[in-house]
Image: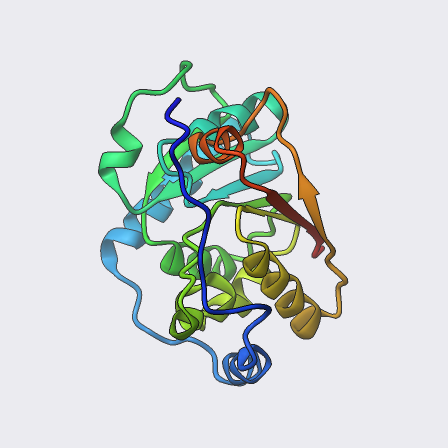
Amino acid sequence: MNAASRPVHSGQEGPHRDLDLLLRRHAAHPYLKPLLEHNQQAFDTAIAAWQAWNKEAPLVLDAGCGVGWSTLKLAERFPEHFVLGVDQSLDRLSRGKPMPLPDNAAFVRADLVDFWRLLHAAGVTLARHYLLYPNPWPKIGHLGRRWHGHPVFPVLLALGGQLECRSNWRIYVEELAQAITLLTGVSAGVEDFDPGDEPLTPFEAKYAASGHRLYRLVAELS
């Protein structure tokens, strides 16, 4: 494992000053961009796989799963759940995996913005929802590109379940906690996190090996 990863650098010294204003705007104006057909087809295939395995099984979403290590490990960790690993990159999803695909898991190539909205429109409630090392977009002007700054964020929260985010940039997780509390009233604390010998993702393994401090947020949205 290459341990040459550099820590996140940003001009921000704390949560963005415009975060609350942006969140209130997004909460007041639902995101109505038309859904793309290929995302609808991917969604239909994913739901069919879940229902074919066990339509009563709780659903876990590994959002932005990358090469899918985390999806496979989550499927092993929660054998009574069905785990969907969603990523927009076919290249990442196609890379070699460290273990065979469990029966209670499936990979989906789709844009998360559409996939979250399709889940919500279908009335799906998640049991667990993972945002593992999302792109931090650390520049001050990048707030709107972070998931909690995106117009789809209220829909993400509406899916419920236990939301867990991990990052090597504390400000990202602090902003996410602030956003969750503002829009739902749910208190979400930020904690230092050590994955030990069982990192969930290649990024987590690389950051830990590089000596980065890692942070985690867990919020019970349901």
With respect to residue 164, does 182 lie above or below?
A: below
Can I make out residue 15 in this image?
A: yes
Colouring chosen for the image of the structure = rainbow
Can I make out residue 79 in this image?
A: no
Q: Is residue 88 left or right of residue 212?
A: left
In the rendered image, residue 56, in percent from the top left (x then y), is placed at 61, 36
In the rendered image, residue 208, in percent from the top left (x then y), is placed at 53, 32
Q: Is residue 186 left or right of residue 56?
A: right
Q: Is residue 90 left or right of residue 150?
A: left
In the rendered image, residue 176, in percent from the top left (x then y), is placed at 60, 62
The residue located at (75%, 70%) in the rendering is 185
Quadrant of res 180: bottom right
The residue located at (39%, 42%) in the rendering is 86
The residue located at (55%, 52%) in the rendering is 124
Quadrant of res 91: top left
Q: Nearer the viewer, residue 143 or 114?
A: 143
Quadrant of res 68: top left
Q: Nearer the viewer, residue 83 or 72?
A: 72
The quadrant of the rendering that contains the C terminus is: bottom right
The residue located at (57%, 83%) in the rendering is 24
